[in-house]
Image: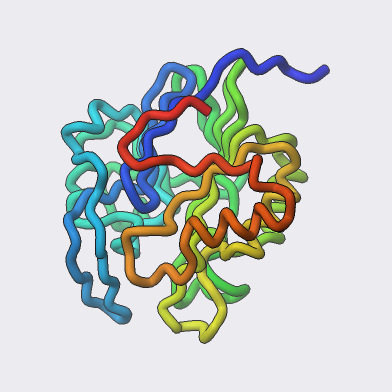
């Protein structure tokens, strides 16, 4: 018997990968990034070119942070790290838990219950196979609750094969938040480290009838494809109606 979905999810895009979700009576935030534009030196220097639509105080109280990974500033910047201290529950990788106080590790396929919701860690790959020694371990998440849509949050995943595996194990997805933008800093040549237009379309096809919410395609210099380009790719494939492109700072019912 197919479960009846009776509720919508409220989504508010802060900017980049940072999305506030109202789901199952709780407030969730993905990958906190609240800094103003600036540079982040490291093995590869990242350049933030746009600030958030709203600041951490305007986001309001958050029950749970879903952190794809902690090692890159475009997923957890300086202000985002400070924001974690405000939140009782932060779920991320085991590596992040070893580096950040208060972070709870969520292994692949492990499920925890928070309030009325179940959160499952799902695999993600931040580049081509074998990239982990360079880009680090990252994770995605699936949210489920009675009467609520099933929500998949990809994290910085570039692997369509993993999307196929997630669908096979989890079952139908109603809303898929995909990190897109074809992020590329050149460490793997022309191979992108997040979904590009073509791979996002293939992922969407595997995700059945899911509404596709693309995020993390703007605000940083290393994104090589725009949301306008993504929309064209989906349009040419007859799938533009699947996309729900959010306007930053505006709460949207999905």
| Picture coordinates of residue 199, whole percent (x, y) | 65, 63
Q: Is residue 182 above or below residue 211?
A: below
Residue positioned most to the bottom: 189
| Picture coordinates of residue 229, whole percent (x, y) | 54, 62
Q: Is residue 139 visible?
A: no
From the viewer's perspective, is 245 left or right of 172? left
Residue positioned most to the right: 1
| Picture coordinates of residue 127, whole percent (x, y) | 54, 71
Residue 210 occupies quadrant? top right
Name the residue located 56 percent from the left edge and 16 percent from the top edge. Answer: 7
Q: Is residue 86 above or below residue 105?
A: above
Q: Is residue 40 visible?
A: yes
Name the residue located 50 percent from the left edge and 54 percent from the top edge. Answer: 179
Name the residue located 35 percent from the left edge and 56 percent from the top edge. Answer: 75
Residue 162 occupies quadrant? bottom right
Q: Is residue 129 above or below residue 231?
A: below
From the viewer's perspective, is 251 left or right of 130? left
| Picture coordinates of residue 1, whole percent (x, y) | 83, 17
- Front residue of this view, candidates 240 and 4: 240
Name the residue located 47 percent from the left edge and 76 percent from the top edge. Answer: 133
């Amino acid at each position: 018997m197919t479960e009846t979905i009776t509720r919508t999810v409220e989504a508010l895009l802060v900017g980049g990968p940072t999305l506030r979700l109202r789901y199952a009576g709780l407030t969730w935030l993905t990958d906190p990034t609240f800094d103003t534009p600036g540079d982040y030196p490291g093995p590869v220097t990242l350049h933030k070119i746009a600030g958030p639509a709203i600041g951490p105080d305007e986001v309001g109280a958050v029950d749970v942070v879903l952190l794809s990974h902690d090692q890159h500033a475009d997923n957890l910047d300086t202000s985002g790290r400070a924001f974690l201290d405000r939140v009782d529950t932060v779920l991320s990788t085991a590596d992040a838990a070893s580096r950040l106080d208060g972070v709870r590790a969520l292994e692949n396929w492990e499920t925890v219950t928070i309030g009325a919701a179940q959160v499952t860690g799902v695999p993600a790959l931040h580049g081509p196979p074998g990239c982990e020694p360079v880009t680090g371990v990252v994770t995605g998440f699936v949210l489920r609750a009675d009467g609520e849509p099933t929500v998949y949050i990809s994290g910085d995943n570039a692997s369509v094969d993993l999307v196929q595996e997630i669908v096979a194990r989890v079952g139908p997805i109603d809303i898929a938040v995909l990190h897109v933008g074809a992020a590329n800093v050149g460490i793997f040549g022309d191979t992108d480290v997040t979904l590009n237009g073509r791979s996002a379309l293939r992922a969407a096809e595997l995700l059945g009838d899911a509404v596709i919410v693309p995020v993390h395609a703007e605000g940083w210099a290393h994104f090589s494809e725009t949301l306008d380009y993504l929309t064209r790719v989906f349009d040419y494939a007859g799938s533009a109606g699947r996309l729900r492109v959010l306007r930053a700072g505006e709460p949207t019912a999905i």
